[in-house]
Amino acid sequence: MRVVDSIHHRDPSPGKKNWLICVAVIPFIILVLGTLLFRFSDLDVTISRLFYIEDQGFYLKSTQPWLFLYRHGNVPGLLIGFFGLFLFLARPIWKKIGSHWKTGVFLVLLLVLGPGLIVNTVFKRNWGRPRPIEIVAFGGEQAYRPVWQKGIAGQGKSFPSGHASIGYYLMGPFFFLYPMGRKRWGLLFLMIGLAYGTTMGIGRIVQGAHFASDVLWSAGFVYYTGLVLSIFFRFDRMGRKTGQL
C-alpha cells in the first residue's frame, strides 16, 4: 500500500526540470557558443562581405524580397500583438473567453518588452555598434566593433536587429501552448518564429544594416523574454486545470 501511495504522490518535478533544461539551458549554450564564435573570429564581416561589391556597395539591398520584408515584414508580428490586445480587452464583454485573456496579456507584454523595450530601446538606441555599411571595411568611416563590444550611443544602431526581433516574436505562442500541453502547436509556432525571424535577419544582413551576430541576439532577447514571462504566468498550471497536461 505504501508503495502504491508513493507512486501516486511522486513529485512530477523531474519532468518539469527536463522541460526547463530543453527550453532554457540548451538555447543558452547555443547562444554562448555562437557569441564566442562571432566575437573571436572574422565571421561577422565575412558573412556581410558575401553581399558587398566594392563599386556597388550592398548591391542587393533594394531587391526583392528583402525590400518588401524591410517595409512590411513587421505586419505578422503586429497582428499577433493586436490579437493579444483584443483577447485582453474582450474579457469584460465576452465571458466565454475564460482564462485566454491571460495569453492575450502575455502576447502584448512579450511584444512590448522583447522587440519594443529590450531590443529597440535599451540596446539598439544605446549600445552604439556601427552597422556594416558604416564601417571602414564596407566604405564607411567607423571602426568595426565585435559583438558585445559597446560603442558610443547614437553612433551606431546595429546591435541587435529590430526587424529580426519582430520576426522572432512570431514564436510567442510557443511559450504558452507547449507548457499547457499543446506541444505540437507550440513547436510549430517555435519553428515558424525562428524561420521568419531568421529570414528577416538575412534581409537586413543583405542590406548592410546588421551583422549576423545582431540577428543571433535578437533571437536570444525575444526568446528569453518569452521564457521568463511564461514562467511568471505559470501556463503549466493552466494546462493542468483544463486537463491538457
Image (tube, helix red, strand yellow):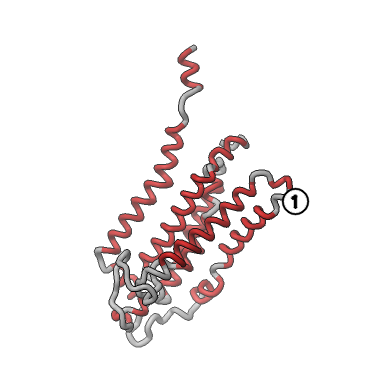
Furthest-left residue in view? 40
Q: Can residue 236 be seen in this view?
A: yes
Q: In the rendering, at what x and y percent does residue 3 appear? A: 46, 15
Quadrant including the C terminus? top right
Image-based side of 130 in relation to 188, left or right: left
Residue at figure coordinates x 59%, y 60% from the top left = 81
Q: Say which of 186 and 135 sits in front.
A: 135
Residue at figure coordinates x 29%, y 68% from the top left = 146
Q: Say which of 153 and 106 sits in front.
A: 153
Instruction: Note whether 81 is above or below 93 in the view shown.
Output: below
Q: Quadrant of residue 127?
A: bottom left
Furthest-top residue in view? 1
- The residue carrying pointer 1 sits among few (fewer than 14), some (14 to 19) or many (20 or more) residues within 10 Å by Cα, namely few
Return the residue at label 1. 93
Q: In the rendering, at what x and y percent does residue 9 appear? A: 49, 23
Q: In the rendering, at what x and y percent does residue 62 appear? A: 48, 81
